[in-house]
Amino acid sequence: MKRINPRTKRFFKMGDKRYDGYIFVNYGSKILKKGPFKGFFKEGFYSPKKFKQFKIKQKTKEPFKRNPTGKGKKEINPSTGKPWKFGEVDVKSGKIFEYHRTSFIKHNGYIPTSWLTFRGMHIRRVRTALRRRRKSYPKNFKLNLDYLLKIFPQNFICPALKIKMSWGGDRNASPSLDRTNNNKGYTKDNVIWISNRANTIKSEASYDQIIKVGKWLRNKGY
C-alpha cells in the first residue's frame, strides 16, 4: 500500500518535499514489516543536494524506448570492427559483453548493450549449469550454487587435460560440470568441473578404452 502525502492528500510524487526538507523520489518494491509505516511500501527520499545530482544524471542519461521490431544499429567492437559478440572483453572497462538488448532502442538509433564483470559472468554461467542439470536430472540432485563455485578450479585449468577453460569462445575449452560416475546422481561427492573436450572424450568411451587408446598412440609415437 502506498502512503498518502499528508500535505497534498494524494500519493507522493517525485519532487514532493517532506517536513524535514528531504525530497520524494519513488516508492520502493518492499513493504515495511515494522515501525510506524508498517504495511506501506518503502519510500525513497533524497536530500536537496542529492536530489539535484539525481535530476542532472537523469537528463544526461541516454533514454531508451521500446523496440517492437528488434531492429537498430549495433555497437561495434573497436578491436574487431564488428558488432560485439558474447564473451568479448571491453579493453577500457574490463567488462564482458553479454548481449544486445534488442527489445529496446536508444533515441540515437543504437540498440543498448548488456555487460557483466568477470565474476558476474562466471556466477551466471555456473548458475545456468546448475539449473540445467537440476531440470534434466531431478532425481538424487543435491547441489547448490555455493558448492559449485567452491569446487570450481581457481586457475580455470581443466584438471584432466590441463588446458585453460573459459566461458564463451572455443567450445572445447568451455567448463563442463561432470559426474565422475555416470551411474550416480549429481551429488557433492560425484561432480567435478572439467573442460567440455575432456567431458566429451570421457562420455564416448570407458576408462579402459581411453587408457588403451592412449597407450597405443604413445607406442606409435603420435
Image (tube, helix red, strand yellow):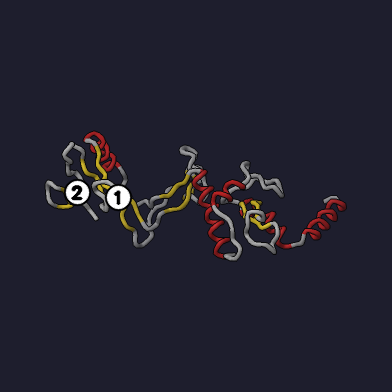
For image coordinates 67% across by 56% down, the residue present is 190
Q: Position of residue 222 (x, y in %)?
A: 82, 51
**Foreground of the two, 144 or 26:** 144
Q: Residue at x 70, y 45 (%)?
A: 162
**Badge 1 or badge 2: first in the primary sequence:** 2
Callout 1: helix, strand or loop?
loop
- Picture coordinates of residue 195 (x, y %)? 65, 52
- Asked if residue 203 lies left or right of residue 167, the reply is right
Question: Mark on residue 138?
Answer: none
In front of the other: 51 or 18:
18
Which residue is found at the position 24% from the left and 33% from the top? 49
> What element does badge 2 sit on?
loop
Q: Quadrant of the N terminus?
A: bottom left
Amino acid, disc 2? Lys
Q: Is residue 138 left or right of residue 60?
A: right
In this orientation, which residue lies closer to the viewer: 1 or 11?
Answer: 1
According to the picture, the residue beneath numbered tag 2 turns out to be: 13
Q: Position of residue 28 (x, y in %)?
A: 29, 49
Q: In front of the other: label 1 or label 2? A: 1
What crowding class fits label 2: few (fewer than 14 Cα within 10 Å), some (14-19), or many (20 or more)?
A: some
The residue identified by callout 1 is 32
Disc 1 and disc 2 in contact, CB within 8 angstroms: no
| Spot occupied by residue 126 in the image (x, y as percentages of width and height) | 55, 52
Q: Using a 10 Å C-alpha cutoff, classify the residue at mark 1 as few (fewer than 14 neighbours), some (14 to 19) or many (20 or more).
A: some
Is 31 left or right of 127, judged from the image as shown? left
Could you give the CA–CA distance between mark 1 and mark 2, rounded to whole angstroms? Answer: 19 Å
Q: Amino acid at mark 1?
A: Leu
Height in image: 146 above or below 92?
below
Q: Nearer the viewer, residue 182 or 85?
A: 182
Residue located at (37% from left, 51% from top): 110
